[in-house]
Amino acid sequence: MQNSKTAVATPTLKRRLICLVYEMFLLTAVVMFGMLVFLLITQNMVKAVKEYGGTAVLVLVSAAYFIHSWTGSGHTLAMKTWRIKLVKVGHATVPFKAAALRYVLGWGWVLPALIVCWRFHLTGKSQVAGALAINIVLWGMTVFLDKDRQFLHDRLAGTRLIALPKPVKAGKAAKPAEA
């Protein structure tokens, strides 16, 4: 169900979640390249530099990927594939500040679970996976709290996801009316 004020469709939850899974595969490749560069630069540095630096590279490379994509075309490669676009009402493109805020708030998908695991010393694979699964389900359910069916991080950042129409194929173009 979408807001009657908006003329654009909101992508279905299923479509957004499938896009999210696809995004994780693409992001893995982007982050691996960033980590490769980082590891080549820090070959003989102390363990702390590699450990904390690696975490910083992961966060910064993923931030650069998402923020650049959202402020440029309004979508990442996965979003383009699934015909989903990020917009901010009243703006031609998503402003940097809104994209950066959305990125930070997007950590709500996993960060609370990681904090719980750290705080309660949950280190087993099944414990961490369980905490992440619960967190992802709970965060995903925030879509049902919004009248426009937007996720919490989109509502707080003032952005929204819209569904783009299917492209018209050349062979299926509208035929002119016969006289």
Image (cartoon, rainbow, N blue to C red):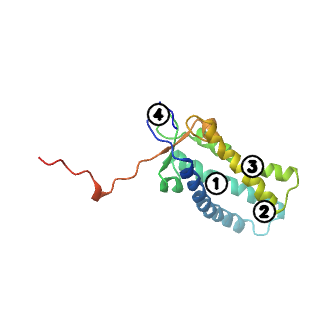
Distance of label 1 from label 4 (alpha carbons) = 31 Å
58 or 154, nearer to the observer: 154
Distance of label 3 from label 1 (alpha carbons) = 15 Å
Q: Give the mark toward the camera: 3 or 4.
A: 4
Which amino acid, by three-letter code, is at mark 2? Lys
State the residue lying farthest toward the top: 5
Contact between labelled residues 2 and 3, with CB atoms less than 8 Å apart: no
Q: Is residue 161 left or right of residue 40?
A: left
Which residue is label 3 attached to? 111
Which is more N-terminal, label 2 or label 4? 4
Which residue is label 2 attached to? 50
Q: Position of residue 46 (x, y in %)?
A: 83, 64
Q: Is residue 27 left or right of residue 45?
A: left
Which residue is label 4 attached to? 6
Check disc 2 and report its element: helix, strand or loop: helix
Contact between labelled residues 1 and 3, with CB atoms less than 8 Å apart: no
Distance of label 4 from label 2 (alpha carbons) = 48 Å
Which is more N-terminal, label 4 or label 1? 4
Which amino acid, by three-letter code, is at mark 4? Thr
Contact between labelled residues 4 and 1, with CB atoms less than 8 Å apart: no
Q: Position of residue 149 (x, y in %)?
A: 57, 39
Which is more N-terminal, label 4 or label 3? 4
